[in-house]
């Protein structure tokens, strides 16, 4: 009930934006190739479904594979760097430096090295996704309670038990924060990777629409990118609520 009471505000804001956009476009008589109205974008989305549904499904497939790969590498890297402090001191600065390389600059090099197949696209999505997950998970490990850690050591727990019983559950909220960030980044990474020369995908559809001055189709592509980002974000939130039930129960008990 609380979500229903507060959820109408962003919906009302979006509706107000669309109504204002529609009214301004009609009043100023703006050409559709320059700035189409929401109604024109909607009509194009309905009429062109046959043309871009294959592009949409291709992007979804690429995003899911890249996100799962990037998440696996990010979590594995965070666990290894946490368990091996010397390795963390060596590799962590390099991870930060890797994020200072613009993807749009790195993408052509990946095409030269690995061709136009799926591999360079997955590398781009992985590079986009793994860093937020690795950093967030490492921060989660650092939030482990020193008192509980001392208690487990006094009780005779070994490193493996301490990790699975204390450190890993403590890091889960931070891990899901990184997953939510990477879920939205993965869609953008997939679209950017499709600009490298893919045959299908929202990025390809957007490029073709832009080159032919079909601005309405460009906005359709933007709309689907936003929907995919929101969908993946909601899926991660749903999984988080199922996995971290203890956090909600603890909050209710303290409340």
Image (tube, rainbow, N blue to C red):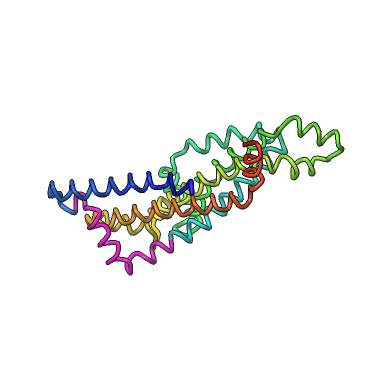
Q: x, y percentage for residue 47?
A: 27, 67
Residue placed most toward the observer, 237 or 36: 237
Is residue 213 shown left or right of residue 159? left
Is residue 56 shown left or right of residue 249? left
Residue placed most toward the observer, 202 or 44: 44
Q: x, y percentage for residue 151?
A: 81, 33
Q: x, y percentage for residue 171?
A: 65, 40
Q: x, y percentage for residue 90?
A: 65, 33
Residue placed most toward the observer, 52 or 96: 52
Residues rendered magenta in the picture: 33-58
Is residue 253 shown left or right of residue 156? left
Residue placed most toward the observer, 175 or 91: 175
> In percent of the image, x 39 and y 47: which residue is there?
8
Q: Is residue 55 magenta?
A: yes
Q: How many marks?
A: 0
> In percent of the image, x 43 and y 55: which residue is there?
228
From the image, which quarter does the C terminus lie in?
A: top right
> In percent of the image, x 33 and y 46: which residue is there?
12
Residue 79: image quadrant is: top right
Placement of 41 over or under 182, stated as above or below? below
Q: Is residue 227 magenta?
A: no
> In percent of the image, x 53 and y 34: which residue is there?
97
Placement of 236 over or under 54, stated as above or below? above
Placement of 41 over or under 159, stated as above or below? below
Is residue 48 shown left or right of residue 148? left
Residue farthest to the bottom, as pictured:
50
- Residue 199 seen by the camera: no
Q: Main secondary structure of the magenta part?
A: helix
- Residue 93 seen by the camera: yes
């Amino acid at each position: 009930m609380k979500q229903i009471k507060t959820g109408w505000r962003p919906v009302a804001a979006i509706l107000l934006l669309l109504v204002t956009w529609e009214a301004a476009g009609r009043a100023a008589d703006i050409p559709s190739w320059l700035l189409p109205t929401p109604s024109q974008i909607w009509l194009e989305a309905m009429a062109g479904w046959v043309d871009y549904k294959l592009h949409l499904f291709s992007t979804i497939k690429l995003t899911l594979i890249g996100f799962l790969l990037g998440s696996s590498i990010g979590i594995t890297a965070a666990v290894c760097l946490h368990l091996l402090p010397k390795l963390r001191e060596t590799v962590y600065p390099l991870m930060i430096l890797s994020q200072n390389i613009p993807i749009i600059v790195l993408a052509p090099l990946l095409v030269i090295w690995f061709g136009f197949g799926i591999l360079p696209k997955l590398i781009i999505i992985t590079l986009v996704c793994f860093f937020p997950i690795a950093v967030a998970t490492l921060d989660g490990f650092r939030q482990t309670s020193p008192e509980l850690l001392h208690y487990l050591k006094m009780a005779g727990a070994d490193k493996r038990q301490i990790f699975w019983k204390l450190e890993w559950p403590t890091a889960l909220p931070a891990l899901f924060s990184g997953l939510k960030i990477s879920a939205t980044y993965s869609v953008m990474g997939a679209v950017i990777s499709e600009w490298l020369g893919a045959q299908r995908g929202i990025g390809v559809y957007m490029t073709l629409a832009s080159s032919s001055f079909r601005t309405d189709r460009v906005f359709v592509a933007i709309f689907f990118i936003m929907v995919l980002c929101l969908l993946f974000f909601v899926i991660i939130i749903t999984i988080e609520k199922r996995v971290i039930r203890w956090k909600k129960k603890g909050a209710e008990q303290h409340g």
